[in-house]
Image (cartoon, rainbow, N blue to C red):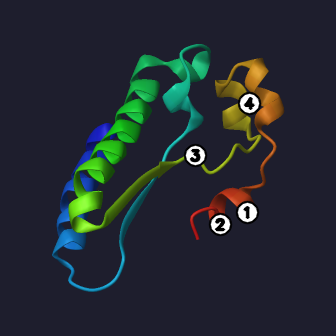
Amino acid sequence: MFLGTFLCAKHFMRLLLESKDGDKASIEINSIAALMVRGMVATPGYCVSKTAQLRLMEMIHEQHNTTEGLLAYSVHPGGVATELSLGATPDAIHPFLVNSPELCGAFCV
């Protein structure tokens, strides 16, 4: 999971930095799993990948924002109660899965 984000960032950031005009921004969709350490969703591979994605975007932003104007963000656009999310998260998370798919889909727009 992290490798895909890394490779996309590597090649996309090069294109952004080469562009002379216009805004330079990259948004990576993440998950609350990047911050979790307990429950089924806290499986080592998934959570570690999400945490690595979060840190990658933070580092890209820090290294390229001031000198080159590049913005890089990692966002968690909301939680939707789906069969998958209800089955993969601890019961304590379920009350927070209140967002609609439309909100999550339009979050970055």
The residue beneath circle 4 is 86
**Labels 4 and 2 touching (C-beta < 8 A):** no
Q: Quadrant of residue 71?
A: bottom left
Q: Which mark is residue 106?
A: 2
Mark 1 lies on residue: 102
Q: Which residue position holds label 3?
A: 76
Per the model, the C-alpha gap separating discs 3 and 1 is 14 Å
Tell me the residue at 73%/37% (across/down).
Answer: 83
Give the Cα distance between marks 4 and 3. 17 Å
Residue found at x 35% / y 37%: 55
Q: CA distance from mark 1 to mark 4?
A: 18 Å
Marks 2 and 1 sit apart, C-alpha to C-alpha, by: 6 Å
**Camera-nearest residue between 18 and 8:** 18
User: Mark 3: which amino acid?
Assistant: His
Q: Are marks 3 and 1 in contact (CB under 8 Å)?
A: no
For the residue marked with disc 1, what is the amino acid? Answer: Glu
Answer few, some or many: residues within 10 Å of disc 1's Cα (few below 14, many 20 plus, some between 14 and 19).
few
| The residue positioned farthest toward the top in the image shown | 38
Please, what is the three-letter code of the amino acid marked with disc 2?
Ala
Dot placed on the residue nearer the N-terminal end, 3 or 1: 3
Residue at image point 21% right, 80% down: 19
Q: What's the CA distance linking mark 4 and mark 2?
A: 22 Å
Quarter of the rendering occupied by the N terminus: top left
Query: Which secondary structure, mark 1?
Result: helix
Q: Toward which corner of the image does residue 90 lie, by quadrant?
A: top right
- Can you tell which of label 4 and label 2 is closer to the viewer? 2
User: What element does badge 3 sit on?
Assistant: loop
Which mark's residue is nearer the viewer, 1 or 4?
1
